[in-house]
Amino acid sequence: MTIEQIAEKLSRGERIDATEAKLLWEKAPLWLLARLATEAKVRKSGDKVFYNKNFHLEPTNICLFECRFCSYRRCKGEAGAWDYSMEEVLEQVEKRKTSSATEVHIVGGVHPDRDLYYYAEMIRRIKTIMPEVCVKAFTAVELHYMIRKAGLTIEEGLQLLKEAGMESIPGGGAEIFDERVRAEICPGKCSSAEWLDMHERAHKLGFDSNATMLYGHIENIDHRIDHLLRLRDLQDRTGGFNAFIPLKFRSANNGLTELGETSVVDDLRTLAMSRLILDNVPHIKAYWVMYGKEVAEMALSFGADDIDGTIEDSTKIYSMAGAADERPRLTIGEIEKMCASAGYKAVERDTHYNELNGKRKTEPTMRSESRGCLHTMPSRKEEKPAKQD
């Protein structure tokens, strides 16, 4: 099949396979990928680009894993390590209590001494301070460790967190699914099968989640396509992924520094191909903290329809790896300007992609536990006090 035939197929909204994706990724001109990805984006979200008002909590960067790409991880007692107490974490939430944030995003190192019950209590206490905020927390890697440490099944662990108030799962820890690559860049971390299984089980319990791919290190295009197709297969089964986030490897201060970083052109091709392959994932996110504001704006012309949120200088993961914004934050005005410059309309959303239009919804749309479909859940004010999810 020729590039022109593949392009015609995509313009009709048809699915492409691995062979077609590789030819397009490697040989198609950049302008064609931009056009095709924009067509696919418009079919999904029209003239809208989404953002949310959020902040991050990173309780610790102490981690038992030694991923070669990571600039964030530290050992106990090492310079640059932090390990906030429960009270210190809650103080960070208290500072934002009167903000208009609709989401708190919690990730960190896989701390060897913290288990599921500790983090469930953290969520409960966060919800006491900010009962209306959505808690999106813990990568599949973190969940795998803390649930196993607690001696529970995956379903039991996820249910405990749900009852504590967790609603959604971020997409980190996926890295690259190819196990040979994974063994080189993140030995000891949960396998690709375990990552996918965690999200599948979470989707079946009613959680939605995001998915990621770390690219631009030792992997190749075949590995990227394989990764995207595994996500597409899981989405076919569950429908639980809200968004996909391609994460660019940043080379400062880690074990793969000598590799340097991939080009902006490769970033844009990866964004476009993600949109074209993941035909069943509603949103593609250009995470501005990682790309920088200028490239994130360019990404809106290559299939991305989400740029994440305001952040409010609350994450260090990418600044420690050399990202341009050492103190990342975006104002709503800046977001609106970025979107308008790309020809789109900025739309505020919540974690579950309900459109807010400047107002908090009292009846968020959540996923059905039994079917992976959407339905309206009762307002939090109507729920029993003991169950804050």
Image (tube, grey):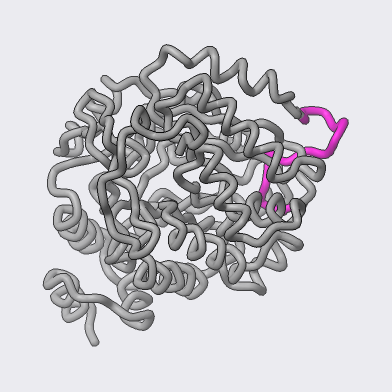
Magenta-colored span: 67-81
In the orientation shown, which residue stands out farthest toward the right? 77
How many badges with numbers are in the image?
0
- Residue at screen point 34% across, 53% down: 367
Residue in front for this viewpoint, 92 or 166? 166
Farthest residue to the front: give it: 384
Residue 302 screen position, x and y as percent = 27, 52
The answer to whether 126 is drawn above or below residue 287 in the figure is above
User: Please, what is the dominant secondary structure of the magenta stretch?
Assistant: loop
Q: Position of residue 252 (x, y in %)?
A: 65, 40
Whether residue 295 is visible: no
Relative to 102, 13 lies left or right: left
* Position of residue 373 measured from the top left corner of the image (x, y, whole percent): 29, 59
The reply to whether the magenta stretch includes residue 78 is: yes
Front residue (pair 99, 380): 380
Residue 72's spot in the image, x, y percent?
68, 39
Give above or below for 250 relative to 388.
below
**Quadrant position of the N terminus in the picture:** bottom left
Residue 10 seen: yes
Q: Is residue 317 left or right of residue 222?
A: right
- Residue drawn 23% across and 23% down? 358
Q: Nearer the viewer, residue 241 or 21?
A: 241
Instruction: Check the picture and name the quadrant holding the C terminus.
Output: top left
The residue drawn where x is 52% and y is 69% is: 220
Q: Is residue 88 magenta?
A: no
| Residue sitting farthest toward the bottom | 1
Q: Is residue 121 above or below residue 209?
A: above
Q: Residue at x 29, y 49 (%)?
A: 304
- The answer to whether 119 is drawn above or below residue 153 in the figure is above
In the picture, measured across the screen, residue 139 lies left or right of residue 40, that is right
